[in-house]
Amino acid sequence: MTHAFYFPVAACGGTALAAAAAYDKRWLVVDAAGHWLTQSHHEQLADIQVEPRLGYLVLRAPGMLRLDIPLDVIEDDDSVRSVATVGTQQVDVVDEGELAATWLTKFLGQPCRLVKVHPDAGRVLWPEL
């Protein structure tokens, strides 16, 4: 029997946890210009293990402390909204803050940010990798 795999952070490690289905590709890592980073940009993205646990999105990576991001936050602060480029599509996103940015920047070795697709953004057309 084949189990579904879900990728809460697009291009990072996946999980077979059924609880992750509701969060599949809700987050993505973007570079300083707001472009989605894929494993072709950074193979290390695959080393980031992601799973939902007790109301948090938990990220783990070799040599890094665990990072917990609250799963279900009301996106009512327009100051953290921006636009990310996914393929040729512009996507409305919410920045997850400086702690997540610092964690990812340290692990990947380049300035980047963790952003969440805004609930009102509509369907994201993820390019085939």
Image (cartoon, grey):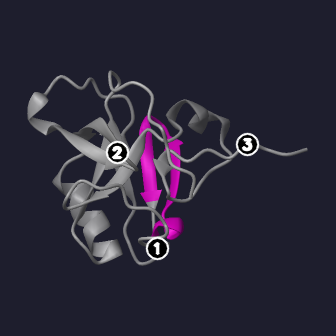
Q: Residue at x 8, y 35 (%)?
A: 79
- What amino acid is labelled 3 in the image? Ala
Coordinates of residue 45 in the picture (x, y in percent): 46, 66
User: Looking at the picture, which amino acid does disc 2 mark?
Assistant: Ile
Identify the secondary structure beneath mark 3: loop
Disc 2 and disc 3: Cα gap in Å? 23 Å
The label number, if any, that marks residue 44 in the structure image: 1
Amino acid on which disc 1 is placed: Gln
Residue 19 within the magenta-colored segment of the rendering? no
Asked if disc 2 and disc 3 are in contact, CB closer than 8 Å, the reply is no
- Magenta span: 45-59
Residue density around tag 1, few if under 14, some if 14–19, many if 20 or more, within 10 Å: some
Tell me residue 7's x, y (percent). Answer: 55, 48
Residue 4's label in the rendered image is 3
Q: Nearer the viewer, residue 127 or 115?
A: 127
Up/down of 63 relative to 99, above or below: below
* Quarter holding residue 13: bottom right
Along the line of sight, the residue nearer the viewer: 20 or 125: 125
- Quarter of the image with the N terminus in it: top right
Question: What numbered label is drawn on residue 69?
Answer: 2
Compare marks 2 and 1 and give the one earlier in the sequence.
Answer: 1
Instruction: Tell me if residue 92 comes above or below residue 110 in the rendering.
Output: above
Q: CA distance from mark 2 to mark 1?
A: 20 Å
